[in-house]
Image (tube, rainbow, N blue to C red):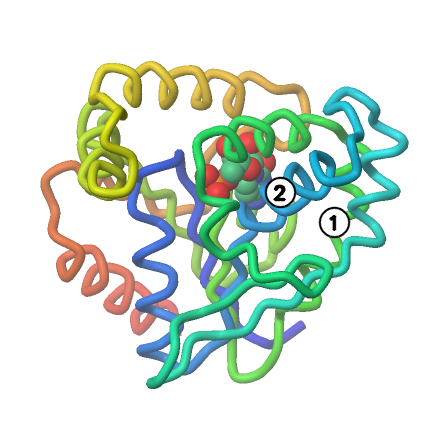
Amino acid sequence: SIIPVIAIDGPSGSGKGTIASLLARHLGWSLLDSGAIYRLVALAAEYHQIPLDQEAKLSELAAGLDVRFIPATEQSPANILLEGQSVTDCIRTEQVGAGASKVAALPQVRAALLQRQRDFRQTPGLIADGRDMGTVVFPDAPLKIFLTASAEERARRRYLQLKDKSPDVTLTSLLGEINARDARDTQRAIAPLVAAPDALSLDSTSLSIDQVLKYILDAAIQRN
Ligand code: C5P
């Protein structure tokens, strides 16, 4: 395909999600939040009471997943519908994130979701956010970014996001969860979190959102 893709991969809390949606708005490109798709599979499994180790049933569920991604507009934020119901906020809990990382370790589930992800590649371009965008889903992406940050900084960012909504979260418990999820995502046999050989690595620990955006936009211009 000649439709451009900017693949942004990295661990949870590296700022990928924020950066990807800002870039998509800025460029007027489509946005693929692939983590949301794994989160939706985990949530749908809970609704349908499918245990998270039943690979065949989960891949069937993933293949037939009834979801709609409604992009943000000037008037309203992005919205995600699962089986017709808005689940935009409830897929963001740590519990659903942990479930997502379990279903994401199942090869048949990943295979069932591959084409659905590739279908987001539409003109004039796509910003793809995930763990394996540059390695597996869009290996031909002209620009690949591997965005990282220290685990402590990622826990701190997550804490600031969550503390008003969930007063019982602590920095220590978040750091523990982030380390556990990193370990699962980097050590799994299939599509582990790893930088593509041709990715540009960027450590955002001490960078502002604007600095990261500028770095990626400059790199996009240079690759053209
Ligand atoms: O990015 P996010 O935290 O929403 O992703 C949730 C989980 O989905 C991750 O911990 C990871 O296990 C899985 N995931 C994946 N491949 C992707 C995106 C997410 O395995 N491309």
Q: For the residue marked with disc 2, what is the amino acid?
A: Tyr
**Whether residue 86 is visible:** yes
Q: Quadrant of the C terminus?
A: bottom left
Q: Is the distance from the Cβ of mark 2 to the nearest ligand 1 atom less than 8 Å?
A: yes
**Residue 94: x and y, percent?**
44, 31
Q: Nearer the viewer, residue 83 or 58?
A: 83
Q: Position of residue 163 (x, y in %)?
A: 21, 36
Q: Is 123 situated left or right of 28 in this image?
A: right
- Position of 94 with respect to 15 (left or right) is right
- From this viewpoint, is residue 196 visible? no
118 relative to 173 in the view: left or right: right
Residue bearing the label numbered 2: 38
- Crowdedness near tag 1: few (<14), some (14–19) or many (≥20) residues, C-alpha within 10 Å: many
Of callouts 1 and 2, which one flags the residue occurring earlier in the amino acid sequence? Answer: 2
Residue 124, x across and y down, in percent: 52, 83
Label for residue 163? Answer: none
| Disc nearest the viewer among 1 and 2 | 2
Residue depicted at 29% across the width and 35% down the height: 166
Q: Is 26 placed above or below 103 here? A: below
**Helix, strand or loop under label 1:** helix
Instruction: Say which residue appears at 45% left-offset and 62% top-offset.
Output: 6
**Callout 2: SS:** helix
Residue displayed at 66% across by 20% down: 189
- Label 1–label 2 contact, CB within 8 A: yes
Residue type beneath disc 1: Leu
Residue appearing at x 38%, y 43% in the figure: 146
Does residue 28 appear left or right of residue 137 in this picture? left
Quarter of the picture holding the N terminus: bottom right
Q: Is residue 40 or residue 202 the one in the foreground?
A: 40
Mark carried by residue 113: 1
